[in-house]
């Protein structure tokens, strides 16, 4: 049991290290990740400044994080496509556009949640 716990602890720690490395690399290279992070900080600050229910706050915070997730996945798609080939290919463009669309849809979901909460 102890060996299993040590192995799982190592595996978890490695995951933390690799995830942090991915975040730092994306932060350094992607202006949009920095912009969405700032938007999230402002959104979270507003969510705690306004008299929202815990559920409303949780929704706003979770959707804000989902925008960051979408941006990180979009970055991964773009990096992979660029690594595979520098040639122009319609499939590569569709992959990149789909990643970008995913970010836009996540952002729309977050904005729609804010709209419904503020109007409702």
Image (tube, rainbow, N blue to C red):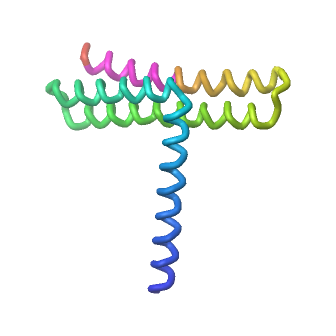
| Residue 9 place in picture, x, y as percent | 46, 71
- Label count reads 0
Q: Residue at x 60, y 33 (%)?
A: 75
Give the extent of the magenta segment. Answer: 105-117
Instruction: Classify residue 85 by image quadrant.
Output: top right
Quadrant in which residue 93 is drawn: top right
- Dividing the picture into quarters, in which one does residue 82 lie? top right
Give the side of residue 2 with respect to residue 93, left or right. Answer: left
Q: Is residue 61 magenta?
A: no
Identify whether 57 is placed above or below 39.
Answer: below
Residue 112 covered by magenta stretch: yes
Q: Nearest the camera: 85 or 61?
A: 85
Looking at the image, which is closer to me, 106 or 44?
A: 44
Foreground residue, 117 or 82?
82
Q: Is residue 58 above or below residue 22?
A: above
Q: Position of residue 60 (x, y in %)?
A: 32, 30
At x 43% / y 23%, what residue is drawn?
Answer: 35
Foreground of the two, 17 or 55: 17
User: Looking at the image, which residue is at 54% across and 29% down?
Assistant: 30
């Amino acid at each position: 049991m102890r060996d299993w716990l040590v192995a799982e602890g190592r595996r978890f720690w490695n995951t933390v290290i690799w995830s942090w490395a991915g975040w730092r690399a994306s932060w350094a290279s992607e202006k949009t990740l920095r912009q969405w992070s700032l938007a999230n900080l402002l959104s979270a600050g507003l969510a705690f400044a306004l008299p929202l229910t815990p559920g409303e706050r949780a929704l706003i915070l979770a959707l804000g994080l989902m925008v960051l997730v979408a941006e990180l996945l979009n970055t991964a798609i773009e990096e992979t496509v660029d690594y595979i080939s520098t040639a122009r290919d319609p499939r590569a463009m569709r992959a990149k556009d789909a990643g970008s669309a995913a970010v836009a849809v996540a952002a729309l979901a977050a904005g729609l949640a804010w709209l419904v909460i503020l109007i409702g």
